[in-house]
Amino acid sequence: MATLFSKIIKGEIPCHKVAENNEFIAFLDIMPVKEGHVLIVPKVEVDAIFDMEDDVLGRMMIFSKSVAKKIKIAFPCNRIGVTVIGLEVPHAHIHLIPIDKLDDMNFAKDKMSLTQDQLKMIAKKIELA
């Protein structure tokens, strides 16, 4: 059964894409913990990140690094936080979040509720960085 992310990758569900290559896609989390929160997803369905082949995982981190640099330009911050949780969608993914303090990555707090226009503007800002 295709995951939510597989449907996004196939274009069956819209997303706010900020970067893409032949192996990975980066798009905004629609329920972010902070403005600029991006998901990095492999185009091949793999449930858990550590089930990925080593070379693919390495390339995913390099792709994440290029996206993180754009996020930091678009949303100046102390660091780009990186986390892998993987409980909400059974498809490996990395969260990239602009942070200034540890609480900026607190997934237990209420998520932001942004409009489609706001998400579109955020995605454009990162894409053009």
Image: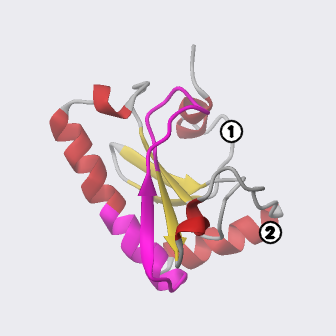
| Residue 3 placement: quadrant | top right
Dot 2, crowdedness within 10 Å: few (<14), some or many (≥20)? few
State the image coordinates of residue 34 (x, y, percent, origin top left): 65, 67
User: Which residue is at 43% across, 70% downward?
Assistant: 80
Q: Nearer the viewer, residue 93 or 124?
A: 93
Q: Is residue 11 above or below residue 65?
A: above
- Mark before the other along the chain sequence, 2 or 1: 1
Q: Name the residue that disc number 2 marks.
A: 117
Magenta stretch contains residue 90: yes
Q: Nearer the viewer, residue 68 or 42?
A: 68
Going by the image, does 31 lie left or right of 78?
right
Q: Secondary structure at mark 2?
A: helix
Q: Is residue 16 above or below residue 53?
A: below
Magenta stretch contains residue 40: no
User: Which residue is at 30% across, 25% downward?
Assistant: 51
User: Which residue is at 72% across, 53% downward?
Assistant: 31
Q: Which mark is residue 13?
A: 1
